[in-house]
């Protein structure tokens, strides 16, 4: 039997192509276009080639921001993942208090990002903020506007407050999917609490935990609003993370060419690290299997 | 190994049970003899698993006591009771190898490494998984996983009892038979007290020395397979055991004559002054289809199941099943049935009533 050849079917994918073109491809290409040119306004462009990329790669400023960014993501992952799992393990399994915990836990996730920033900006102020005032009354030298360490602690605690719930909720969902029989079998096998965690809960949570880690990494690596509202990248450059630096470059200095080159490199870094994370974690999964 | 005594035991999942209906497990007194193999048989939701979980200590009963060899263990933890239990669905530790899975209960109890190695090898052979001992448990089939669960249940030699909660549900039919045989030979070899929950009568009858039939949270009969077949204590037992189940026919009984819709049926025993709902119970095997005498029936269907024929008929508007031998020819004018008087049981309010010799 001959198959009829009908190329008209290609039209069926057209809507998706158009959508993706406008939502992703065209904006991205615009950025690529900027990154290889120099402009002084008036729609005048001069070909720059890879000059911006080269210049940025030799710039300490970018490396500093990247280093701070990596530090930030690493610290919050190290805190939020274990803490989230710990919270999930201790949440009630059912009944009124389970629902209550779920609602309370979701609250920080529902607060708009700039509001989170504002809350902590005021909370930490030494003159009127509850936290800042209390700390300084206790004789602790805390001032996030002048002390880099205090600024770092503030944005990290803020991020932990904002996002640990996400990890906890995902881990909780993973825990809820474990049938009772597993815990009963563990009791009968006389497994210790640690063994129950190690051999039942952790393996069953691994899937959702992987998603949680990936999400938290990508989100934290792109964070902008909250630290910007609290510290504005300061004191000095101490909390200038990648995206804050990018905005300074693009909108503060209006260096569109370097900013575009920066964006592309930023994007590639996130893509690469996420890919590495994903590969490592799925491989771990396979090896276990 | 131990004798297990249930003393006034009852359980309700409702913290403040108001009536008997709130009890998933109604008051129960029973002694499980040391070293016997029991099957706990009943339809879904009749309280079988509740009873099993109470014995293993996963559930605290609302009332009553459990004794192992006359020691009260009602408050004791699962670990202290030293019980092994296998669940309906496979429970394996995914990240461990088959070997580690089997060794886990022994390791947790601090057995010596050499003993563990030897015992695990032995159990591995018993469940037919010697070749897979070093594989991860995760990638295995449901069959294999359940075999690991069974193996983990059997790995400890000193357990007080082995409890099985419908363990062969996920296993292929041919494997079911093999594993059941293995469990049985294991029982012969070590003499553990075994309690095997199932809703499959074949499984129960082939596995156990004694079958415990439960219905609506109550133990309705404990007996050998023959007793359950010949003298069901409750209409549920008659209906549940046997294929097809016992025929239950509403009747009036006076002395040694039962009257079914005006037609009389002779009984082997004599009964006096029966009150309540009176029914006759007669197994299809003891009903014969005849031409001239007996009660009128309307035959609806004849099923030839190979070993015998099952006649589905109607008796005064009620269904009745008749089992006829394979060679019997069934003709259209066979429209009456007779019962073997020796095999007709009389039930009052669903419970068996013993009569006096007529």
Image (spheres, coloured by chain):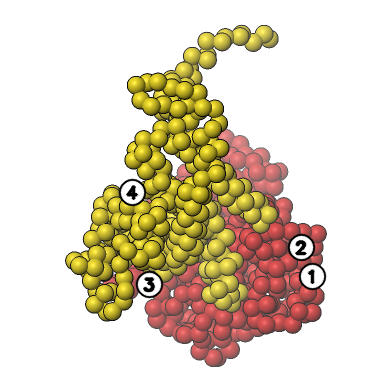
Chain colours: A yellow, B red
Name of the residue lying farthest toward the bottom = B71
Of mark 3 and mark 2, the one earlier in the sequence is 3
- Rendered view: A40 above or below A156: above
Q: Which residue bears the numbered disc 1?
A: B121
Query: Counting other residues with Cα less than 10 Å from the Cα at mark 1, is it few (<14), some (14-19), or many (20 or more)?
Result: some
Marks 4 & 2 on one chain: no
Q: Which residue bears the numbered disc 2?
A: B133
Towards the viewer: B162 or B121: B121
Q: Secondary structure at mark 2?
A: loop
Q: Quadrant of the N terminus of chain A?
A: top right
Q: Which residue bears the numbered disc 4?
A: A225
Q: Secondary structure at mark 3?
A: strand
Query: In the rendered image, which quarter is residue B227 located in?
Result: bottom right
Query: Which mark identifies residue B12?
Result: 3
- Rendered view: A145 above or below B153: above
Query: Distance of mark 4 from mark 3, alpha carbons?
Result: 55 Å
Query: Distance of mark 4 from mark 2, alpha carbons?
Result: 54 Å
Marks 3 & 2 on one chain: yes
Query: Counting other residues with Cα less than 10 Å from the Cα at mark 2, is it few (<14), some (14-19), or many (20 or more)?
Result: many
Asked if disc 4 and disc 3 are in contact, CB closer than 8 Å, the reply is no
Asked if disc 2 and disc 1 are in contact, CB closer than 8 Å, the reply is yes
Query: Distance of mark 3 from mark 2, alpha carbons?
Result: 42 Å
Query: Counting other residues with Cα less than 10 Å from the Cα at mark 4, is it few (<14), some (14-19), or many (20 or more)?
Result: some
Pointer 1 indicates a residue of which chain? B
Give the label, 4 or 2, closer to the camera.
Answer: 4
Relative to B90, A229 lies left or right: left
């Amino acid at each position: 039997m001959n198959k009829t050849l009908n190329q008209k079917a290609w039209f069926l994918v057209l809507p998706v192509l158009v959508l993706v073109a406008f939502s992703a491809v065209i904006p991205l290409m615009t950025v690529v276009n900027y990154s290889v040119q120099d402009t002084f306004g008036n729609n005048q462009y001069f070909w720059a080639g890879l000059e911006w990329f080269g210049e940025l790669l030799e710039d300490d400023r970018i490396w500093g921001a990247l280093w701070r960014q990596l530090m930030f993501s690493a610290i919050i992952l190290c805190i939020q993942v274990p803490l989230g799992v710990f919270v999930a393990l201790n949440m009630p399994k059912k009944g009124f208090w389970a629902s209550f915990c779920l609602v309370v836990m979701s609250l920080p996730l529902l607060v708009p990002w700039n509001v989170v920033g504002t809350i902590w900006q005021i909370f930490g102020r030494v003159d009127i903020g509850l936290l800042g005032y209390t700390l300084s009354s206790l004789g602790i030298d805390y001032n996030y506007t002048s002390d880099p360490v205090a600024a770092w602690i503030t944005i990290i605690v803020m991020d932990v407050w904002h996002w640990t719930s996400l990890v906890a909720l995902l881990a909780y969902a993973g825990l809820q999917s474990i049938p009772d029989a597993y815990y009963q079998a563990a009791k009968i096998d006389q497994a210790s609490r640690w063994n129950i965690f190690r051999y039942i809960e952790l393996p069953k949570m691994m899937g959702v935990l992987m998603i949680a880690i990936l999400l938290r990494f990508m989100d934290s690596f792109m964070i902008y609003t909250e630290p910007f509202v609290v510290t504005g990248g300061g004191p000095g450059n101490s909390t200038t993370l990648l995206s804050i630096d990018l905005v300074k470059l693009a909108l503060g200095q209006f260096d569109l060419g370097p900013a575009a080159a920066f964006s592309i490199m930023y994007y590639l870094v996130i893509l690469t690290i996420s890919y590495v994370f994903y590969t490592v974690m799925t491989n771990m999964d396979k090896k276990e299997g | 190994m131990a004798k297990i005594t249930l003393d006034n035991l009852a359980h309700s999942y409702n913290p403040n049970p108001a009536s008997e209906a709130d009890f998933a497990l109604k008051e129960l007194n029973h002694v499980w003899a040391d070293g016997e193999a029991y099957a706990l048989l009943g339809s879904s939701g009749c309280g079988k698993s509740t009873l099993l979980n109470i014995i293993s200590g996963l559930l605290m009963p609302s009332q009553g006591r459990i004794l192992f060899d006359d020691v009260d263990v009602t408050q004791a933890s699962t670990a202290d009771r030293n019980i092994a239990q296998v669940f309906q669905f496979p429970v394996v530790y995914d990240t461990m190898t088959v070997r580690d899975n089997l060794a886990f209960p022994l390791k947790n109890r601090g057995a010596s490494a050499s003993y563990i190695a030897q015992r695990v090898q032995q159990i591995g052979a018993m469940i037919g998984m010697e070749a897979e001992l070093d594989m991860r448990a995760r990638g295995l089939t449901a069959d294999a996983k359940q075999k690991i669960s069974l193996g983990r249940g059997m790995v400890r030699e000193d357990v007080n009892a082995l409890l099985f909660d419908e363990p062969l549900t996920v296993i292929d039919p041919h494997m079911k038979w093999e594993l059941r045989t293995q469990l049985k030979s294991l029982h012969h070899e070590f003499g553990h007290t075994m309690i095997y929950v199932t809703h499959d009568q074949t499984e129960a009858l082939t596995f156990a020395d004694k079958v415990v039939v439960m219905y609506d949270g109550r133990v309705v009969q404990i007996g050998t397979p023959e007793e359950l077949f010949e003298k069901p204590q409750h209409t549920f037992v008659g209906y549940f055991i046997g294929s097809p189940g016992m025929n239950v026919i509403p009747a009036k009984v006076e002395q040694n004559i039962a009257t079914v819709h005006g037609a009389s049926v002779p009984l082997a025993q004599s009964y006096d002054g029966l009150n309540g709902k009176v029914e006759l119970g007669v197994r299809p095997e003891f009903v014969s289809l005849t031409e001239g005498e007996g009660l009128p029936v309307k035959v609806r269907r004849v099923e030839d199941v190979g070993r015998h024929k099952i006649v589905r008929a109607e008796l005064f508007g009620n269904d009745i099943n008749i089992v006829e031998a394979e060679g019997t020819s069934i003709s259209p004018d066979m429209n009456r049935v007779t019962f073997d008087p020796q095999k007709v049981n009389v039930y009052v309010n669903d419970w068996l009533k013993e009569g006096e010799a007529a």
